[in-house]
Protein backbone atom coordinates (compact mmCIF):
# COMPACT_ATOMS: atom_id res chain seq x y z
CA UNK A 1 0.00 0.00 0.00
CA UNK A 2 2.69 2.49 1.01
CA UNK A 3 4.77 1.53 -1.94
CA UNK A 4 1.81 2.30 -4.14
CA UNK A 5 1.53 5.81 -2.70
CA UNK A 6 5.25 6.32 -3.09
CA UNK A 7 5.33 5.09 -6.67
CA UNK A 8 2.31 7.02 -7.78
CA UNK A 9 2.34 10.27 -5.84
CA UNK A 10 -0.55 11.64 -7.88
CA UNK A 11 -2.72 8.64 -7.14
CA UNK A 12 -5.35 9.95 -4.73
CA UNK A 13 -5.05 7.04 -2.32
CA UNK A 14 -5.55 8.41 1.17
CA UNK A 15 -5.06 6.64 4.48
CA UNK A 16 -8.82 6.78 4.98
CA UNK A 17 -9.35 4.94 1.70
CA UNK A 18 -6.71 2.42 2.63
CA UNK A 19 -8.48 1.65 5.90
CA UNK A 20 -11.78 1.36 4.10
CA UNK A 21 -10.30 -1.10 1.64
CA UNK A 22 -8.73 -3.14 4.41
CA UNK A 23 -12.08 -3.20 6.23
CA UNK A 24 -13.83 -4.45 3.08
CA UNK A 25 -11.19 -7.13 2.55
CA UNK A 26 -11.53 -8.29 6.16
CA UNK A 27 -15.29 -8.39 5.84
CA UNK A 28 -15.03 -10.41 2.63
CA UNK A 29 -12.67 -12.88 4.24
CA UNK A 30 -15.20 -13.42 7.04
CA UNK A 31 -17.97 -13.98 4.56
CA UNK A 32 -16.04 -16.64 2.70
CA UNK A 33 -16.65 -20.14 4.01
CA UNK A 34 -13.72 -21.02 6.22
CA UNK A 35 -12.66 -24.24 4.60
CA UNK A 36 -15.30 -25.30 2.19
CA UNK A 37 -17.70 -27.70 3.72
CA UNK A 38 -18.54 -27.64 7.36
CA UNK A 39 -20.89 -25.64 9.55
CA UNK A 40 -19.78 -22.05 9.18
CA UNK A 41 -17.68 -20.32 11.80
CA UNK A 42 -20.74 -18.76 13.41
CA UNK A 43 -22.81 -21.93 13.65
CA UNK A 44 -19.98 -24.07 15.09
CA UNK A 45 -19.32 -21.55 17.83
CA UNK A 46 -23.01 -21.22 18.64
CA UNK A 47 -23.48 -25.02 18.75
CA UNK A 48 -20.51 -25.59 21.07
CA UNK A 49 -21.69 -22.82 23.35
CA UNK A 50 -25.29 -24.05 23.56
CA UNK A 51 -24.12 -27.64 24.06
CA UNK A 52 -22.62 -26.63 27.40
CA UNK A 53 -26.07 -25.75 28.74
CA UNK A 54 -27.57 -29.15 28.02
CA UNK A 55 -24.86 -31.20 29.71
CA UNK A 56 -25.77 -33.35 32.73
CA UNK A 57 -25.92 -31.23 35.93
CA UNK A 58 -22.71 -32.69 37.35
CA UNK A 59 -20.76 -31.48 34.27
CA UNK A 60 -22.33 -28.09 33.64
CA UNK A 61 -20.36 -26.26 36.34
CA UNK A 62 -16.99 -27.29 34.96
CA UNK A 63 -17.89 -26.52 31.36
CA UNK A 64 -19.53 -23.18 32.15
CA UNK A 65 -16.28 -22.09 33.69
CA UNK A 66 -14.56 -22.84 30.38
CA UNK A 67 -17.38 -21.90 28.02
CA UNK A 68 -15.32 -19.22 26.37
CA UNK A 69 -12.61 -21.68 25.37
CA UNK A 70 -15.17 -24.26 24.17
CA UNK A 71 -16.86 -21.58 22.06
CA UNK A 72 -13.78 -19.90 20.63
CA UNK A 73 -12.10 -23.17 19.67
CA UNK A 74 -15.15 -24.72 18.03
CA UNK A 75 -13.62 -24.34 14.57
CA UNK A 76 -10.13 -25.72 15.26
CA UNK A 77 -10.67 -29.00 13.40
CA UNK A 78 -11.60 -27.04 10.26
CA UNK A 79 -8.55 -24.84 10.55
CA UNK A 80 -6.22 -27.80 10.19
CA UNK A 81 -8.42 -29.66 7.74
CA UNK A 82 -6.03 -29.25 4.82
CA UNK A 83 -2.82 -28.99 6.80
CA UNK A 84 -3.07 -32.25 8.73
CA UNK A 85 -2.98 -35.47 6.72
CA UNK A 86 -6.09 -37.55 7.30
CA UNK A 87 -8.04 -34.69 8.90
CA UNK A 88 -10.59 -34.04 6.13
CA UNK A 89 -12.36 -37.47 6.23
CA UNK A 90 -13.02 -37.01 9.95
CA UNK A 91 -15.70 -34.44 9.13
CA UNK A 92 -18.08 -36.55 7.04
CA UNK A 93 -19.22 -39.97 5.91
CA UNK A 94 -20.76 -40.69 2.50
CA UNK A 95 -23.24 -43.23 3.82
CA UNK A 96 -25.10 -43.78 0.56
CA UNK A 97 -21.92 -45.18 -0.98
CA UNK A 98 -22.46 -48.23 1.23
CA UNK A 99 -25.99 -49.02 0.06
CA UNK A 100 -29.42 -49.05 1.63
CA UNK A 101 -29.74 -48.51 5.42
CA UNK A 102 -25.96 -48.40 5.73
CA UNK A 103 -26.17 -46.52 9.01
CA UNK A 104 -27.79 -49.55 10.62
CA UNK A 105 -25.74 -52.20 8.90
CA UNK A 106 -22.19 -50.88 9.06
CA UNK A 107 -19.79 -51.98 11.80
CA UNK A 108 -19.84 -49.77 14.90
CA UNK A 109 -16.16 -50.28 15.59
CA UNK A 110 -13.22 -49.15 13.50
CA UNK A 111 -11.39 -52.48 13.50
CA UNK A 112 -14.38 -54.35 12.12
CA UNK A 113 -15.05 -51.60 9.57
CA UNK A 114 -11.41 -51.86 8.41
CA UNK A 115 -11.73 -55.61 8.01
CA UNK A 116 -14.89 -55.29 5.97
CA UNK A 117 -14.05 -52.31 3.72
CA UNK A 118 -10.31 -51.66 3.98
CA UNK A 119 -8.71 -48.42 5.11
CA UNK A 120 -8.51 -46.79 1.67
CA UNK A 121 -12.26 -47.10 1.07
CA UNK A 122 -13.09 -45.79 4.53
CA UNK A 123 -10.75 -42.84 4.19
CA UNK A 124 -12.11 -42.05 0.73
CA UNK A 125 -15.72 -41.83 1.95
CA UNK A 126 -15.22 -40.39 5.41
CA UNK A 127 -14.69 -41.80 8.89
CA UNK A 128 -16.70 -39.39 11.04
CA UNK A 129 -18.64 -41.82 13.31
CA UNK A 130 -15.55 -43.85 14.20
CA UNK A 131 -13.52 -40.72 14.79
CA UNK A 132 -16.13 -39.38 17.23
CA UNK A 133 -16.02 -42.70 19.04
CA UNK A 134 -12.24 -42.51 19.23
CA UNK A 135 -12.41 -38.97 20.60
CA UNK A 136 -14.87 -40.09 23.25
CA UNK A 137 -12.32 -42.61 24.51
CA UNK A 138 -9.57 -39.98 24.45
CA UNK A 139 -11.76 -37.53 26.35
CA UNK A 140 -12.64 -40.14 28.96
CA UNK A 141 -8.94 -40.83 29.41
CA UNK A 142 -8.16 -37.12 29.72
CA UNK A 143 -10.72 -36.87 32.53
CA UNK A 144 -9.17 -39.90 34.27
CA UNK A 145 -5.75 -38.24 33.95
CA UNK A 146 -7.20 -34.92 35.18
CA UNK A 147 -5.44 -33.26 32.26
CA UNK A 148 -7.22 -29.93 31.91
CA UNK A 149 -5.59 -28.86 28.62
CA UNK A 150 -6.47 -32.14 26.98
CA UNK A 151 -10.02 -32.13 28.37
CA UNK A 152 -10.68 -28.69 26.95
CA UNK A 153 -9.04 -29.32 23.60
CA UNK A 154 -10.83 -32.64 23.08
CA UNK A 155 -14.16 -31.23 24.28
CA UNK A 156 -14.04 -28.33 21.82
CA UNK A 157 -13.04 -30.75 19.04
CA UNK A 158 -15.64 -33.41 19.75
CA UNK A 159 -18.30 -30.67 19.80
CA UNK A 160 -17.18 -29.75 16.30
CA UNK A 161 -17.33 -33.29 14.90
CA UNK A 162 -20.73 -34.03 16.48
CA UNK A 163 -22.05 -30.77 15.04
CA UNK A 164 -20.76 -31.81 11.62
CA UNK A 165 -22.44 -35.19 12.07
CA UNK A 166 -25.80 -33.48 12.50
CA UNK A 167 -25.57 -31.90 9.03
CA UNK A 168 -27.36 -34.19 6.58
CA UNK A 169 -25.03 -32.95 3.84
CA UNK A 170 -22.09 -34.42 5.76
CA UNK A 171 -23.58 -37.88 5.38
CA UNK A 172 -24.05 -38.09 1.63
CA UNK A 173 -21.91 -38.27 -1.46
CA UNK A 174 -23.98 -35.46 -2.98
CA UNK A 175 -22.67 -33.15 -0.27
CA UNK A 176 -22.96 -29.94 -2.27
CA UNK A 177 -25.80 -30.83 -4.60
CA UNK A 178 -23.17 -31.30 -7.29
CA UNK A 179 -24.89 -34.46 -8.60
CA UNK A 180 -28.35 -32.88 -8.75
CA UNK A 181 -27.65 -29.42 -10.13
CA UNK A 182 -27.95 -27.76 -6.71
CA UNK A 183 -24.35 -26.66 -6.36
CA UNK A 184 -23.87 -24.29 -3.43
CA UNK A 185 -26.57 -25.81 -1.25
CA UNK A 186 -23.96 -26.79 1.36
CA UNK A 187 -22.84 -23.27 2.30
CA UNK A 188 -26.40 -22.02 2.06
CA UNK A 189 -27.66 -24.68 4.44
CA UNK A 190 -24.98 -24.51 7.08
CA UNK A 191 -23.61 -20.97 6.91
CA UNK A 192 -26.17 -18.64 5.41
CA UNK A 193 -29.30 -20.06 7.03
CA UNK A 194 -27.95 -20.25 10.63
CA UNK A 195 -26.70 -16.66 10.33
CA UNK A 196 -30.06 -15.47 9.01
CA UNK A 197 -32.30 -17.41 11.39
CA UNK A 198 -30.27 -17.72 14.59
CA UNK A 199 -32.02 -14.98 16.52
CA UNK A 200 -35.58 -15.82 15.47
ZN1 LIG B 1 -15.89 -29.71 10.16
Image (cartoon, helix red, strand yellow):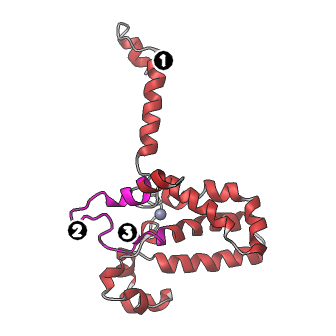
196 relative to 140, above or below: above
Residue at the spot 45% in from the left edge and 37% down from the top edge: 27
Residue with the mark numbered 3: 169
Give the spatial CA distance, label 3 vs label 2. 13 Å
Mark 3 and mark 2 in contact? Answer it, CB < 8 Å: no
Residue at the spot 42% in from the left edge and 18% down from the top edge: 3
Residue with the mark numbered 1: 16
| Residue 65 image position (x, y, % from top left) | 77, 59
Q: Which mark is residue 179?
A: 2
13 relative to 112, above or below: above
Q: Name the secondary structure under disc 2.
A: loop
Mark 1 and mark 2 in contact? Answer it, CB < 8 Å: no
Rate crowding at label 3 as few (under 14), some (14 to 19) or many (20 or more) other CA atoms within 10 Å. Answer: many
Residue at the spot 69% in from the left edge and 64% down from the top edge: 152
Residue 172 belongs to the span the image colors magenta: yes
Q: Sequence order check: which comes first, mark 1 or mark 2?
A: 1
Residue that protrudes farthest toward the top in the picture? 10
Mark 3 and mark 1 in contact? Answer it, CB < 8 Å: no
Which residues fall within the magenta stretch? Answer: 164-192
| Residue 51 image position (x, y, % from top left) | 63, 66
33 relative to 99, above or below: above
Q: Name the secondary structure under disc 1.
A: helix
Q: Sequence order check: which comes first, mark 3 or mark 1?
A: 1
Give the spatial CA distance, label 3 vs label 1. 43 Å
Residue at the spot 46% in from the left edge and 92% down from the top edge: 112
Snapshot quadrant of residue 94: bottom left
Quarter placement of the N terminus:
top left
Q: Is residue 142 left or right of residue 129?
A: right
Amino acid sequence: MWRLIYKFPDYPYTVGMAFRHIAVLLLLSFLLPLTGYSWGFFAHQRINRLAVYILPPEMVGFYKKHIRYITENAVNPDRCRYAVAGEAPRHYIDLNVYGDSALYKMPRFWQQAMERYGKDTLMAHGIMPWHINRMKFQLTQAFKDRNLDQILRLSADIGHYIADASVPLHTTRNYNGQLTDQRGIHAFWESRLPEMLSDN
